[in-house]
Image (cartoon, rainbow, N blue to C red):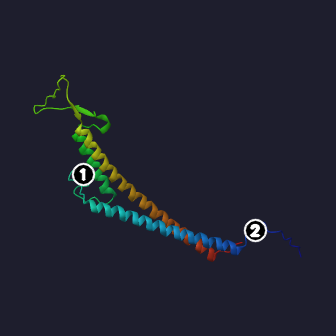
């Protein structure tokens, strides 16, 4: 017979029941955070959709997605895009920052109105001011798109965490922990 030499274990000093408990806690936390994240994602998408419905906006017939109620991210993008196109058409391709703040006041014949010193009377540029409305609308629509994207990310992350929690729970029940 040969002698069998036993070496001391160099494994972890944490006992198997403690490892099992840690996996149980990790799985429960993953489940809780995962379901919470999924619920938050669903709520975020619903909240954005509900507010879009309340505005009752429909894309115009010249939009990329014509005559569609603005509800989801694609119709929000189509509406923001057409608002920008219309604004650029009305300002001859100029953006807000490219336009003069004030312009000469014109009379009925299209001539500049002059003051008592013979200089043109300057008034705020209405076309430039219209860009503020367009920018506000496109920004709100872009935030709606981001809200949908963040909601989708939260839902997928939550789904992943639920899966991780399930894996941890299964490992805890079936694996031999040393």
Q: Quadrant of residue 1?
A: bottom right
**Quarter in which the C terminus is drawn:** bottom right
Residue position marked by numbered label 1 in the rendering = 63
Q: Are marks 1 and 2 in contact (CB under 8 Å)?
A: no
Residue sitting at the far front: 116
Circle 2 crowding by C-alpha within 10 Å: few under 14, some 14–19, many from 20: few
Is residue 34 found left or right of 135 in the rendered image? right
Residue 15, given in percent of the width and then of the height, sits at 73, 72
Residue 88, given in percent of the width and then of the height, sits at 25, 41
Is residue 7 found left or right of 41 in the rendered image? right
Circle 1 crowding by C-alpha within 10 Å: few under 14, some 14–19, many from 20: some
Is residue 166 found left or right of 177 in the rendered image? left
Residue 111, given in percent of the width and then of the height, sits at 14, 28
Taking depth in this image into account, of 10 and 36 the one nearest to the observer is 36
Q: Quadrant of residue 59?
A: bottom left
Q: CA distance from mark 1 to mark 2?
A: 66 Å
Picture residue at 39% right of the left edge, 55% below the top: 146
Q: Earlier in the sequence, mark 1 or mark 2?
A: 2
Vertical position of residue 24 compared to residue 94: above or below: below
- Mark number, residue 13: 2
Picture residue at 23% right of the left edge, 45% below the top: 86
Vertical position of residue 55 compared to residue 166: above or below: above
- Mark number, residue 139: none
Q: Which SS class for mark 2?
A: loop
Residue sitting at the far top: 117
Q: Which SS class for mark 1?
A: loop
Taking depth in this image into account, of 119 and 116 the one nearest to the observer is 116
User: What number of labels is visible?
Assistant: 2
Picture residue at 31% right of the left edge, 55% below the top: 76
Residue 164, given in percent of the width and then of the height, sits at 55, 68
Picture residue at 32% right of the left edge, 36% below the top: 97
């Amino acid at each position: 017979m040969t002698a069998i030499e036993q070496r001391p274990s160099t494994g972890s000093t944490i006992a198997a029941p403690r490892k099992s408990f840690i996996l149980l806690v990790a799985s429960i936390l993953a489940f809780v955070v995962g379901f919470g994240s999924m619920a938050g994602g669903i709520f975020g998408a619903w909240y954005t959709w509900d507010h879009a419905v309340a505005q009752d906006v429909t894309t115009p017939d010249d939009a990329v997605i014509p005559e569609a109620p603005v509800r989801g991210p694609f119709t929000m993008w189509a509406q923001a895009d057409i608002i920008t196109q219309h604004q650029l058409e009305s300002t001859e391709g100029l953006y807000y920052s490219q336009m003069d703040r004030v312009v000469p006041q014109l009379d009925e014949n299209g001539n500049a109105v002059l003051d008592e010193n013979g200089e043109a009377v300057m008034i705020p540029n209405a076309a430039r001011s219209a860009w503020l409305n367009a920018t506000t609308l496109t920004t709100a629509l872009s935030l709606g798109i981001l809200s949908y994207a963040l909601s989708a990310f939260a839902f997928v992350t939550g789904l992943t965490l639920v899966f991780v929690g399930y894996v941890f729970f299964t490992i805890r029940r079936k694996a031999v922990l040393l």
